[in-house]
Image (cartoon, helix red, strand yellow):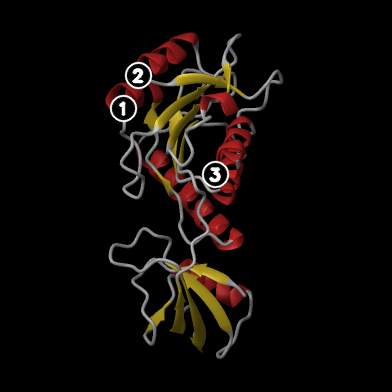
């Protein structure tokens, strides 16, 4: 059944117009009045019950689609461990791919960071447009994979500034546990602890995971992160691409 993100308070028995993006998708699929769909609010709407709702298309206009909200299902498909990804911004479409796959794997939130070796530098209106685009990518991925919670893509920030500004326990979402998140840094340095060893005995504890752009973090950035509580970890002897490494770590953290 087609699934659509609808950022509104959903309630059984009510009718509402789908937001423009969902309405366009319904029209592309050539759905008709009487067809069944699934709606979810993404977990970011205050006062919402979460989960997902059955719904039925009741009106198809030129640009608007109206639906009747049906039965609520308190279904959540979130990972047992909340992982907040601090990702060095990668070039071209690689960041889109990272956001999409991280959403599918169950990331709790994504903070794009501009590091010393980042090719793409963002500020002002361009930064706002990129964040809106990446948030839309996360929404589309959540619709496809069955998640009822859309990970929040935070505003882009300077890596060094973010690390200095956020003390231990900061940078997580309200739904996390009270325990401060474990801070991990993906590093290529020799003698670094394997990821699985670093999280042993930390079942269910939230994680802030920092990964660099192409070329990795600079020695100064790694040192700064270590000063602020980030423990260096490794994924093994092979050097993974900047968009692959955080996904491999995310998979290990949420699927273990």
Which x, y percent locates residue 104? Answer: 59, 51
What x and y, as percent, mark residue 175? 35, 50
**Residue name at image x 59 percent, y 9 percent:** 191
First along the sequence among labels 3 and 1: 3
User: In the rendered structure, which disc, 1 or 2, sits on the residue that comes first in sequence?
Assistant: 1
Task: Find disc 3 in the rendering and name its residue.
Answer: 99
Residue at the spot of label 2: 228
Alpha carbons under labels 1 and 2: distance apart: 7 Å
Between 255 and 4, the one lying in front of the other is 255
**Residue 26 in the image: above or below residue 43:** below
| Residue 152 location (% of width, % of height) | 41, 48
- Count all numbered tags in the image, as a single digit: 3
* Image quadrant assignment for residue 205: top left
Q: Residue drawn 42% across and 40% down?
A: 126
Q: Is residue 123 above or below residue 82?
A: above
Whether residue 62 is visible: no
Q: Nearer the viewer, residue 72 or 46?
A: 72
From this viewpoint, which residue is outermost toward the front?
A: 201
Q: Element type at marker 2?
A: loop
């Amino acid at each position: 059944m087609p699934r659509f993100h609808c950022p509104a308070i959903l309630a059984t028995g009510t009718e509402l117009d789908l937001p423009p993006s969902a309405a366009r998708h319904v029209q592309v699929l050539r759905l008709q009045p009487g067809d069944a769909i699934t709606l979810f609010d993404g977990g970011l709407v205050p006062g919402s019950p979460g989960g997902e709702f059955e719904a039925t298309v009741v009106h198809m206009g030129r640009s608007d689609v109206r639906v009747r909200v049906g039965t609520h299902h308190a279904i959540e498909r979130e990972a047992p461990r909340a992982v907040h990804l601090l990702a060095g911004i990668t070039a071209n479409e690689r960041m889109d791919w990272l956001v999409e796959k991280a959403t599918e794997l169950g990331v709790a939130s994504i903070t794009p960071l501009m590091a010393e070796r980042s090719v793409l530098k963002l500020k002002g209106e361009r930064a706002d447009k990129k964040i809106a685009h990446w948030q839309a990518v996360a929404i589309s991925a959540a619709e496809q994979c069955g998640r009822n919670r859309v990970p929040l893509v935070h505003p882009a920030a300077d890596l060094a500034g973010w690390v200095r500004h956020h003390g231990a326990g900061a940078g997580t979402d309200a739904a996390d546990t009270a325990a401060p998140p474990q801070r991990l840094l993906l590093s290529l340095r020799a003698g670094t602890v394997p990821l699985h060893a670093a999280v042993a005995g930390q079942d269910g504890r939230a994680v802030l995971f920092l990964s660099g752009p192409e070329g990795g973090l600079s020695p100064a950035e790694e040192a700064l992160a270590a000063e602020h509580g980030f423990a260096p970890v490794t994924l093994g002897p092979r050097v993974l691409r900047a968009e692959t490494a955080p996904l491999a770590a995310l998979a290990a953290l949420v699927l273990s």
